[in-house]
Amino acid sequence: MNHLQSLEAHSVFILREAYAKLGRLGLLWSIGKDSTVLLWLAKKAFFGHCPFPFIHVDTSYKIPEMIVYRDKVVADLGLELIVHQNKEALAAGMSPGNGRLVCCKALKTDALNSMTKTHGFDGLIVGVRRDEEGSRSKERVFSERNSSDEWDYTNQPPELWGQFKTDFPKGHHVRVHPLLQWSEIDIWRYIDAEKIPVIDLYFAKDGRRYRSLGCAPCTGRIRSEATTVPQIIEELSATTVSERAGRAQDQEDAYAMQKLRKDGYM
Amino acid sequence: MAGDMTEGGAREKLKLVFTGHVDHGKSTVIGRLLFDAGSLNDGAVAKVRRIAAETGQPFEFAHLLDAFEEEQKQGITIDTTQLQFRTEKRDYVIIDAPGHKEFLKNMISGASDAEAAFLVVDAERGVEEQSRRHAHMLSLLGIRQIGLVVNKMDLVRYDRKVFESVGREASECLAGLGLEINSRIPLSGLKGENVVRPSTRMPWHRGPTLAGALDGLKKSTSPAGRGLRLPLQAVYKFDDRRILAGRVESGRVKIGDRVLISPGRKTATVTSLAAWLDKDLKDEASAGESVGLMINEEFFHRRGDVVSLEDDPPLISDRIKASVFWMGRTPLKPRGRYKLKLASAEVEAEISEIDNLIDSSTLALAPKPARVGFNEVAQVEIRLQRPLALDLFSRHQGTGRFVLVDGHDVAGGGIVTWAEERSDIKFGFVHGELKARCEIFEEYYYNVDEMSVSKAAPERPLYTLGDRVPLTGASYRYPELFDIVIFRDRMAVLVRDGRVAGMLPLGEYSYQGAPLVNGRGFGVLVRSQDDWLKARADFEALTPANESELARRWLDFNTYRRIVIGGNDFQI
């Protein structure tokens, strides 16, 4: 097996473990490249079927093309999609103007947490990767969240030999991370090898492209001439700029992501 | 499977872990390695620079890995990190494992799937308690490729004698565990000597730098060369295909193979390997691959079963000995009950005996301890509630290791060192030397879609005197008091108050008035000792020619058993 094949096989193993061991399961789909690869892996794991719903936490500030693309994929693949918004916060005027971390917490973390409770999910499959940023590099594959959706990162369970923590007190839920050991360039090489369709925003227009997708006000484009997947791979092989450099919320505080993620952020 | 062999996809990737005593400088060495090799992105370096400026502290290479605020403020690694690193030769995943005793479970999480390990030892302080403990864990985790990094050489004026003395000490420690050191590197993580750049201060060192030593490591030999072990994760029936899904732990499987599925010991032929996309269809799969097997038999299989080739089966056992490392807050105790998870199987387990406690520093054995505490290692004997398909760790790692769950938490890990083979008997009763097969607790389902009858093996296939038996199932119901007469093994089993109350050879059995059931769960129409002697004589003379006549004469098919009709979702 080559490297991509072994990454794929391991992710499929994780998805099947989650389906076998967790009760109500959902897959967080952000429209981006990582969760699109997750969708593909789920199809492989379950032989063309997707035995759980997809969830999109919509902040209402997403780049408009993302929503158009989302609805098209859902229709094309016949997916069961749950869209969730923190309507109260939006009605009260929540926006990045209130402070980026405040806004992220309200429209993403709080929305995600209330969605988890409303739908009674025991497990959420999330496409985070270790190489994205520091606190994610310390994550477990099966990562427990308590009944207040908090992550106790100072006391994570042992995880060895493909044996994940699958026993939880009632009211807790598990974040399942099948892509934890993939890197950004692995994702693109896999998209290339498998010919997986991805949203156009990743390809350069007028000398700029999105490297990481998020909310329109807080996500910047990078300078790039890459208009195809192989060109993106080539560009990434040479870069020393981090993937999330265009994500403004990360830069708010040295420990911004650790703090957001402790409260339940993905 | 991703079929395209792109340059990036085909590059070799090796996972290695850095272990060692707290404060011996593992994170600094790795941070320096990544920094000097230019493997860090600007964002990560800028962030550490910014934190250094904000706190007025010097730039710390370790902070490139110790991302948590608590880790940076306390100057220790709390949890394991994985980072990617590449050389001309190949890609690496570098795992930083915490050295502090409190976080041994995090060290184990990081190290458990590494192919090689570097033990980092402080030149000034030499081998310390956690160095030894980590080395012991590496031996239990089955990691055989070990390198020695003697760090902080700048503190001992780059003295060759210090390096050699620490090397001897470490070699002795590892030799006691049956481990050998493959490479030795004197270096300074802080100053960057011998990490990527060869040191001019240690011209006496003839060996490679740390970066050079990485490329000298061997990729672990693939378990594909060994016998097939494929633990089932699930049996899927999403459409008209019935797919046995799992990951090949070792060996290979191909279409046409005769396979054995344990512990039920059912044989079948592989008819195809299922896939979503046509491009992924293939004839063969080997170790590491996640597959979907389709077979030509309709027996009931479930998560936890192990597929092997017919002539190379796993052991079937409910009594094992193991070396166990304990990570639980509550000590492991004799008679303690835990959930044991081995590959995809789960079973209730009882610690029947703690044979020895092993001192990780000296490897001395303390016999019959009253408990095994946090971070301790012991040799134990375990009873499983039902037999599992498993292997000795020395033969098959994937099916020879397990974790113990205490309450909600994974509290221990273990490797199987001995197992009592129980495959001599399939399903049934055992009492001393007496054994009898029987199928009276198996469930029969008629599957409407497939027009076939499926049989499901019971949860606990072996019963002995005093055991409660499952009197009621979906497709059968027996009284509290009855006798089972098993003609093929010439044994009788007495059930009283729902428990096995006696077992004796058929020749010594006499009719006492209890209802009679045969080995398949059908009533035997016997009302007196005379009837019994006639029935016994008839069945002893059973031939294929008189089989149906005898069945009509003696058997009652309606009282105890019925067949449950099911659709696609017929599994229980």
Image (cartoon, rainbow, N blue to C red):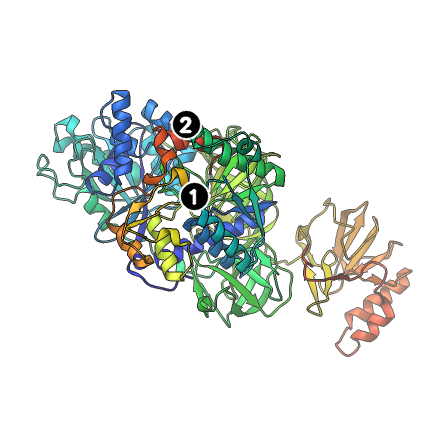
Q: Residue A89 carries which label?
A: none
Q: Which mark is residue A128?
A: 1
Residue A164: image x %, image y %? 50, 43
Q: Which chain carries label 1?
A: A
Q: Residue B102 carries which label?
A: 2
Check whether the beta carbons of the residues at disc 1 and disc 2 lie within 8 A of each other.
no
Q: In this view, does B371 lie to the left or right of B47?
A: right
Have a look at marks 1 and 2 and say if they share a chain: no
Q: Mark 2 lies on which chain?
A: B
Residue A32 visible in the picture: yes
Residue B188: image x %, image y %? 18, 33
What is the three-letter code of the residue carrying label 1?
Val
Judging depth in this view, the residue of B378 and B477 nearest the camera is B477
What is the three-letter code of the residue carrying label 2?
Glu
Name the image quarter holding residue B38. top left
Q: Residues within 10 Å of mark 1 (few under 14, many from 20)?
A: many
Residue A48: image x %, image y %? 53, 61
In the figure, B496 relative to B152: above or below? below
User: How many numbered marks, from 0 up?
Assistant: 2
For marks 1 and 2, give the CA distance: 27 Å
Residue B222 visible in the picture: no
Name the image quarter holding residue B505. bottom right
In the figure, A2 relative to B353: above or below? below
Judging depth in this view, the residue of B429 and A137 nearest the camera is A137
- The quarter in which the C terminus of chain B is drawn is bottom right
- The quarter in which the N terminus of chain B is drawn is bottom left
Q: In this view, does B156 lie to the left or right of B300?
A: left
Q: In this view, does B439 lie to the left or right of A70?
A: right
Q: Residues within 10 Å of mark 2 (few under 14, many from 20)?
A: few
Q: In this view, does B278 lie to the left or right of B21?
A: right
Residue B163: image x %, image y %? 17, 33
Of helix, strand and loop, which one carries label 2? helix
